[in-house]
Image (cartoon, grey):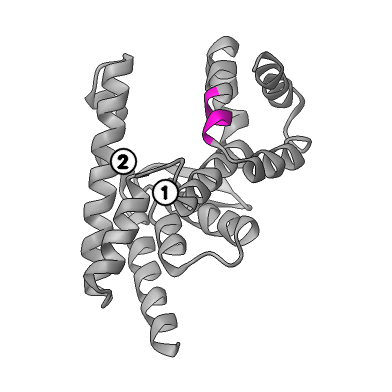
């Protein structure tokens, strides 16, 4: 058990070191953070809340969900649906590759590495409970920490559509957690969530 604890600590430290290089700086918790380092910590925090008995693979995947995401900017692809999907696919492949390299150095075997990579690539979303849990946590982190600012920067109709699509990706347990947290959102952001759910 000690070996496993040491190994996951080494991996998380390496994930965080990789994400600490993010040139985008954001403010939270009274200080400045590299954006993807902050996001990784938020993912781990929500995983602990939402799935306290999560497997080691799931906890690892949560921590490296966006690892070095800034290396493939959205502007590298056309601003249409096809471009968006290509961008997301390339991100998943990159995240899986970088995570695999770090996990191998941390001493993980091929089976564990493959499992974390499958989670990062969101394989079998609706049939794999752990993939679903990771997706729920992704959505909860977005709603709690990033949604309000995102909503201010985009057309309300687009935001409502995104919330509706996000909702369909979540499990009933994810819905319950999101609804419990939605009351703490700023009024305008909460109104958009309510509008999206009413439309659905």
- Circles 2, 1 touching at the beta carbon (< 8 Å): yes
Return the residue nearer the eye: 15 or 134: 134
Residue at image x 40%, y 82%? 4
Residue at image x 32%, y 43%? 69
Residue at image x 44%, y 81%? 5
Question: Start and end of the magenta stretch?
Answer: 165-169
| Disc 1 element | helix
Q: Which mark is residue 19?
A: none
Residue 33 visible in this rendered orientation of the protein: no
Return the residue nearer the eye: 177 or 41: 177
Can you give x and y, in whole percent of width and height, for residue 145 in the image? 60, 41
Q: Earlier in the sequence, mark 2 or mark 1?
A: 1
Q: Gap in Å between the C-alphas at discs 2 and 1?
A: 8 Å
Residue at image x 36%, y 55%? 19
Q: How dense is the environment of label 2, judged by Cα within 10 Å: few (below 14), some, or many (20 and up)?
A: some
Residue 112: image quadrant is bottom left
Return the residue nearer the eye: 10 or 164: 164
Can you give x and y, in whole percent of width and height, for residue 159 in the image? 56, 18
Task: Kindly identify which residue carries mark 1.
Answer: 36
Q: Is residue 167 magenta?
A: yes
Q: How dense is the environment of label 1, judged by Cα within 10 Å: few (below 14), some, or many (20 and up)?
A: many
Can you give x and y, in whole percent of width and height, for residue 15 in the image? 35, 62
Relative to 30, residue 191 above or below? above
Tell me: 122 left or right of 29.
left
């Amino acid at each position: 058990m000690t070996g496993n604890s040491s190994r996951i600590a080494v991996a998380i430290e390496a994930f965080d070191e990789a994400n600490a290089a993010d040139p985008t700086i954001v403010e939270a918790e009274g200080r400045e953070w590299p954006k993807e380092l902050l996001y990784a910590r938020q993912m781990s925090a929500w995983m602990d809340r939402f799935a306290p008995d999560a497997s080691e693979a799931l906890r690892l995947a949560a921590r490296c969900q966006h690892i070095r995401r800034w290396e493939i900017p959205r502007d590298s692809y056309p601003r249409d649906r096809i471009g968006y999907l290509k961008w997301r696919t390339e991100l998943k492949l990159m995240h899986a590759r970088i995570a695999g390299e770090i996990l191998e150095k941390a001493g993980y075997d091929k089976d564990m590495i493959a499992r974390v990579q499958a989670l990062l690539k969101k394989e079998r979303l609706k049939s794999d409970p752990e993939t679903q849990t990771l997706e729920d946590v992704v959505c909860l982190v977005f709603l709690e920490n990033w949604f309000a600012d995102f909503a201010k920067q985009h057309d309300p109709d687009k935001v409502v559509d995104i919330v509706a699509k996000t909702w369909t990706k979540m499990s009933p347990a994810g819905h319950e957690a999101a609804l419990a947290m939605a009351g703490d959102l700023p009024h305008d952001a909460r109104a958009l969530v309510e509008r999206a759910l009413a439309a659905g």
